[in-house]
Amino acid sequence: MKYKVLEGITTADVAYKVYGKTIEELFQNAAEAVEQVMVDLKTINPLNNQQLSISNQQLDNLLLDFLNELLFYKDSQGLVFCQFKISIRNKYELNAKLFGEKIDIKKHKLRCDVKAVTRHHLEIKKDDGKFIATIVLDI
């Protein structure tokens, strides 16, 4: 399982537990979870790619910054993504290739508009050899 919705954490938000064997896989699965809340990923073609580089001295804040960048692309350029190629160097430097396309309301099955990824309950931990993150989305 890549991610699952958490019930009862918040009333007006969407909360997830996200899983990954590596930190890169965790970030990829978190990105898929955020995009899946907004649009059916199966309706997106990986026609365009965007390069993204960010850094942060804390891993949980790096995840927060990365996911909020996805929302920035949606809000500023009308882009949604379905595939993510992630590399993290020196623990806190993320480079990503994001694959997707411009929103087309005739083609894409839009769901809900995510306003932000919040710090509420945000955490990354390692348990039994895998990474687990808790993420709350403001909708």
Image (cartoon, helix red, strand yellow):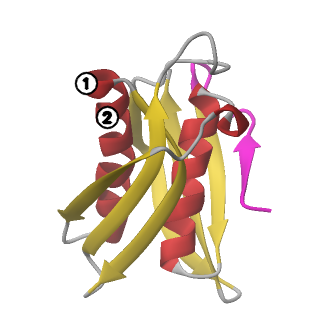
Amino acid type, callout 1: Ser
**Secondary structure state at the residue bearing disc 2:** helix
Q: Residues within 10 Å of mark 2 (few under 14, many from 20)?
A: some
What residue would you read off at disc 2?
73
Amino acid type, callout 2: Tyr
40 is higher (above) or lower (below) than 56: above
Horizontal side of residue 70 vs 1, given as left or right: left
Percent of width and height locating residue 125: 53, 73
Bounds of the magenta span? Answer: 1-13
Horizontal side of residue 25 vs 56, given as left or right: right
Percent of width and height locating residue 23: 49, 77
- Residue at 38%, 77% (x, y): give it: 87
What residue would you read off at disc 1?
76
Q: Residue furthest front?
A: 47
Task: State the image quarter where residue 15 is shown.
Answer: top right
21 is higher (above) or lower (below) than 94: below
Instruction: Specify whether residue 3 is painted magenta.
Output: yes
Task: State the image quarter where residue 2 is shown.
Answer: bottom right
Instruction: Specify whether residue 90 is painted magenta.
Output: no
Q: Residue furthest right?
A: 1
Q: Quadrant of the N terminus?
A: bottom right
- Which mark, residue 33? none
- Residue at 19%, 67% (x, y): give it: 55
Horizontal side of residue 16 vs 57, given as left or right: right
**Residue contact between numbered discs 2 and 1, judged by CB atoms under 8 Å:** yes
Percent of width and height locating residue 6: 72, 42
78 is higher (above) or lower (below) than 91: above
**Secondary structure state at the residue bearing disc 1:** helix
